[in-house]
Amino acid sequence: MELTEGTSTVALQVQKFFKAIRTTFSPVPLASNEYKSPSNNEQSRKRRATMPKLAHCTSSQAAETRITTEITARQNDPFLIIVVHLLPTLPEYLRALKHIGCIKIIIFKGAQDSERPQHMREMAEWVKNNEDFGKAIHPEVTKSYLKTPDNVVELIMNAEIPKGAEIIIMDIGGYFAPCLVDVVRHQTSEKKWKLLGIVEDTENGHQKYNEALQSFSSVSKDLKQPRIYSVARSKMKMTEDYNVGKSLVRAADSILRETLDLRLEDHLTVGVIGFGKIGTSIAMHLRQQHI
């Protein structure tokens, strides 16, 4: 529809409104000099500062003891298969996971590279070029790809995970739910790996895993159900959902005031599209303002 001269002011206000929304809720673009790995000298200095002193040992004995201890600790660590968002906080998240286990597979959640915005492409490039995480990424793996059980089994087997090793899947959105039975069946029959459990971030993914677990009894009584740990249903996440809903109401009110000279409290009826945990929190805070 072509806008007439009389509605041009409204059109400009609407454009300004959506521009404010993008500015408010879009992730901050990745700075070009951000997330640089520390130099070798810095890493050596940090290692020297944190290295425990070994009493009554020569320097060679101390070095040998330290190396043996580090190797033993790494051998006991689980191997991680993770699904991640390409957010500015991803580098810190990956570095934190290194203290839990050895990251073997990284799957980027969302659209393919050509369809991603610039800041997401830059983050994907950072992971690809990182010496610790670059070899673990699998850009060809998508949610639809993981719906085929043979693809998932092949993905894990090609990840250079030792036979009988313990693995943890850290999922966002139930990516591995459609093939859960096959992953556990292959683990049981071939003894290729031991699935310690799955950590699922979202409520939607948690429900998908619940549906997958219900099919275990119909497939085989010998299959042991894996442990599913839900972040979405944890007490900490409940607090976050409450505060996110509150922040969104405040942000929406601020955008309306700055762009359209309106206030939420001037409207007795407001529609909330989506009534999950965030939507419920938004509705609750709107009701508190008598909307």
Image: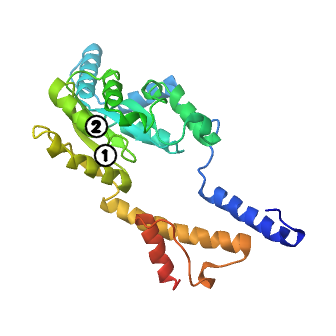
Q: Is 78 left, or right, of 271 in this rendering?
A: left
Marker disc for residue 111: none
User: What amino acid is labelled 2 in the image?
Assistant: Ile
On the image, which quarter does residue 120 sit in?
A: top right
The residue identified by callout 2 is: 168
In this view, the residue farthest toward the right is: 5
Do the CB atoms of the residues marked 1 and 2 lie less than 8 Å apart? yes
Q: Is 172 left, or right, of 16 in this rendering?
A: left
User: What amino acid is labelled 1 in the image?
Assistant: Val
- Residue at (35% x, 23% y) in the render: 159
Q: Is 285 left, or right, of 188 in this rendering?
A: right
The residue identified by callout 1 is: 199
Residue in front for this viewpoint, 39 or 1: 1
Q: Residues within 10 Å of mark 1 (few under 14, many from 20)?
A: some
Q: Residues within 10 Å of mark 2 (few under 14, many from 20)?
A: some
**Residue 228 at x, y percent in the picture:** 25, 47
Residue in front for this viewpoint, 145 or 244: 145
**Residue 71 at x, y percent in the picture:** 26, 22
Q: Is residue 2 above or below residue 107?
A: below
**Residue 121 at x, y percent in the picture:** 59, 36
Is residue 253 visible from the viewing direction of this image? yes
- Residue at (39% x, 40% y) in the render: 96
